[in-house]
Structures are given as structure tokens and as C-alpha cells.
Amino acid sequence: MTNEPVALDAALASFTQRWSPRIVTTVNDYDVRVAKVEGEHLWHTHDHTDEFFLVLDGELHIGLRDEAGERTVVLPKGSVFTVPRGIEHKPYAPVPTEILLLEPTGTSTVGDHHEEIPSHVDATTGHTLT
């Protein structure tokens, strides 16, 4: 990490891969990640951490499965949402979308439990911004 400011627009312009987050900085034991997303991710669950989403551009839908059943939340540009730990969820972007995520360092993008990983999803703990 650097002690210099990071312009999110420049960080997002530095890569093209979808569903492959880049770590822009760390805060205590958390990564601040940015990602470009489009289409479906996969159903997954994080057992030990919540997952924070901020939509920088575009629109993100998050399918949720919990004790109340299945529902979808829609996050337009500028919206935030936190998926609580242990809740099965599936992000989906109907249009090219840019997001910021806040997760403990080392958190996998596909969670602790997940369905089969499609080829367009990068199962990673985040990539260093170059």
C-alpha cells in the first residue's frame, strides 16, 4: 500500500476484468476493494463477516436468501448495502457497474460456501492495484 491518495476513477481505469476486485487501500484489518461487474456472480455465504457494497456507477441487484425467504435488493448509483454474515446472496449487475467493497483482509470473493464457480468469476481475496 502507498501513503499517497488513490483516485478511484484511475484505479478502475487500470483494469478491465469483471468480478475481479482490486485492493485500493486497507483500513485496520479491512480491504477497500473496487470492482467492475456485469451479469451474474454466484450464490455464496460468508460465515464470519458482513459484506459492504457501495455502487459507484451503474446498478447492482443482490439476491438474498434468509429465514424469511428469497428477495432482491436493488442498489442504484450512490447506494450502500450490507449483507449480514451467514446470509446467502448473489450479486447481479444488469448493466456495466462499478462497486466499492469493504471486507476483512483475506476474505474470498466466493465466500465460505458457494455454488460452482463460473469461469467469468475470479475466486480471489483481491488483487493488488497496479
Image: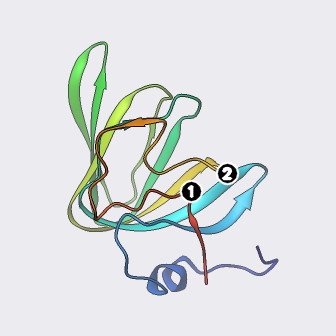
Above or below — where is 61 with respect to 126? above
Q: Is residue 36 left or right of residue 105?
A: left
Q: In the rendering, which numbered label is found on residue 125?
A: 1
Q: Nearer the viewer, residue 54 or 34?
A: 34
Mark sitting on residue 27: none
Decide which of 53, 1 is in the foreground and name it.
1
Instruction: Tell me where residue 69 appears, x and y as whole percent.
Output: 22, 18
For numbered disc 2, what is the local secondary structure?
A: loop
The quarter holding residue 67 reads top left
Going 43% across and 47% down the picture, which residue do you hit? 110
Mark 2 highlights which residue? 105
Disc 1 to disc 2: CB gap under 8 Å: yes
- Percent from the top left, x then y, of residue 104? 65, 46
Between 105 and 76, which is closer to the camera in this rendering? 105
- Image height check: is 127 above or below 94? below
Q: Look at label 2 and name its amino acid.
A: Thr
Badge 2 density bin: few <14, some 14–19, many ≥20, Cα 10 Å: some
97 relative position to 111: left or right = left
Question: How many residues crowd around disc 1 within 10 Å: few (fewer than 14), some, or many (20 or more)?
Answer: many
Residue 100 sits above or below residue 51 on the image: below
